[in-house]
Amino acid sequence: MVRNLLILLAAALVCALPFVLRPAPEAGAWREGDPVLVAVSPHIAAIRDEFATAFSHWHQRKYGRPVRIDWRSIGGTTEIMRYLSGEYNAAYRAYRAREGLDTALTASAFAQRRPEDPEAAAVWEDFRAHDDPERYGCKIDIFFGGGTYDHGAAERQGLTVAPWAPGEWPEGILTDADGIEMIPRELGGETWRTDVYVSAVLSGFGIASNPDRLRELGIEKMPATWRDLTDPRLYGFVGVTDPTKSGSIAKAFEMILHATCREHVLAAGWTPAQIAAFEAAVRNGTEKEMPDFPTYQADVELGWDEGIHLIQRIGANSRYFTDAAGKVPVDVSSGDAAAGICIDFYGRVQSETTRVGDTLRLNYVTPRGGSTISGDPISLLRGAEHRELAQRFIAFVLSEEGQTLWNGLPGSPGGPVKHALRRMPVRRDFYPDAEHPSVDARAKARAGTTSDDLLDPSIDVYELARAFTYEPRWTAPHFSFLRSFVRAMCMDSGRELRAAWGAILEAGGPEAVPEAVQLLERLPLDPYPIDWRHVTEAARNPALTAGLSETDILSMWTAHFRASYREAEAVARRALAERRASAAAPQP
């Protein structure tokens, strides 16, 4: 009996030993019952991990308890928006059913503009009248990351709400202790914040290139403009991301279109001051009083056409269109592609991680005057179950402490723990500011603690933003159109496009076979002609699409381009054959 008791005691000691000897839990470690914040984000895992860790420690210091962030992994921003729209639609429909209200007009609640129909307008207003999780919500508190286009759409659809009323924001967020604005509402024509969303970090778009691969192709100069990506020597060596899968890359394509449009308008002789005056007149409705406006507008439209064809040429040089925005710089650094379009931080991270001593396997450049600087905002979702905790997270992300994570060196004071995020903070006090000595001093005090030299004019996002003036009227209404159109023009008909472009190059280039180029660049006429005026009108007037679905239109465009590209290839090959036959014929 005693022996059995000893055996049981020994067994109990063995089982208890790991619990007795385990180290004391780390201060700030989350335990069951501590707060949980639910967030959805397209940000990469490294960003999510660093912000989750830092916020938990910050919250422990300020409020006495750590926080766990429950990240919902849904996909890119496009997938997130579809998910949120579906969840709110279902939740609001269920609410109306419970209240005995008509559910037939539920979809009207999410229109981006107040419907004209009185009944639909009443539903639209009713949805926006409540921010109570007991009525309806999506079971997620925070939308963190993604571009201003989608956050703006979420705001207009009523999916997001202002975290604080104007004038009630926490001290030190929008302005510093001296009243100096830390996060501008807009710069370079881009909106960085509204009363509902605020950009948490900034991004530009640019070109990644591999110096060794370029030299092999006979290219000594690093591509520094979007037009450089149309160099015939890059045929089959340009990496591109599918804009229908990445809102950020869709924005990059808009930048290519916009920059080309501006180049054309400036080359036509219009000055920046004249452009600003014309665009102000359009906003005020007084453009008809300006005699030169029709000529100016014609140049805008010609520049837009040129931009569409520039995108087409880049697509013709493409090696592939990938679903993953981070794949392009990886492939460029390995030499699988010679150059490619990428988001700035992907290019910088890959450049750093593949560096061998002083030798770079990847160069990254934001074309000066070729890219706007836009934001990845943070928004509070309507009906957030943990509203106060969500407000605290927003305040942390926009604070000086939270902003330090974006570009701080791992292990530096206030920097990330493991990962160099290589992103550009939005706060003004991270960059040089000759106008405000106190802000300038704070920026310079960070020297040596950041992954990138934020004092360098080629990296300073405020300087880059001022070098690019965004005229929303030119291209902003075409953002959704451009996503689908690039897919039809360069992806779904990509095999035919590359074959036609290859045949044109083999035949001596565009100058040698202009008829083939005309066929290549022939744009669809159905369901409406593809030009600035009709695309702008289609964005405002759905009737222009004759009731066709997006899928139907995409199929029509794709069929058009496949046919045009096949004709272009045939013309180029026929011209090449005739030239060869002429060269082989006996000379008299």
Image: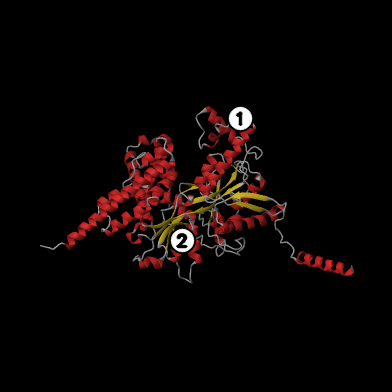
Which amino acid lies under the numbered mark 1 shown in the image of this protein? Leu
Give SS at disc 2. helix
Query: Gap in Å between the C-alphas at discs 2 and 1?
Result: 52 Å
Residue furthest toward the front?
A: 1
Q: Quadrant of the C terminus?
A: bottom left
- Residue 46: % across, % down: 57, 59
Q: Residue 109, can we see it?
A: yes
The circle drawn on residue 73 is none
- Residue 465: % across, % down: 46, 52
- Please say if 552 is above or below 236: above
Mark 2 or mark 1, earlier in chain:
1
- Would you say 486 lies left or right of 354 here? left
Q: Which residue is mark 2?
A: 329
- Residue 337: % across, % down: 41, 62
Q: Which residue is mark 1?
A: 101
Q: Residues within 10 Å of mark 1 (few under 14, many from 20)?
A: few
Residue furthest toward the right?
A: 2
Q: Quadrant of the N terminus?
A: bottom right
Residue furthest toward the top?
A: 118
- Would you say 188 lies left or right of 2 here? left
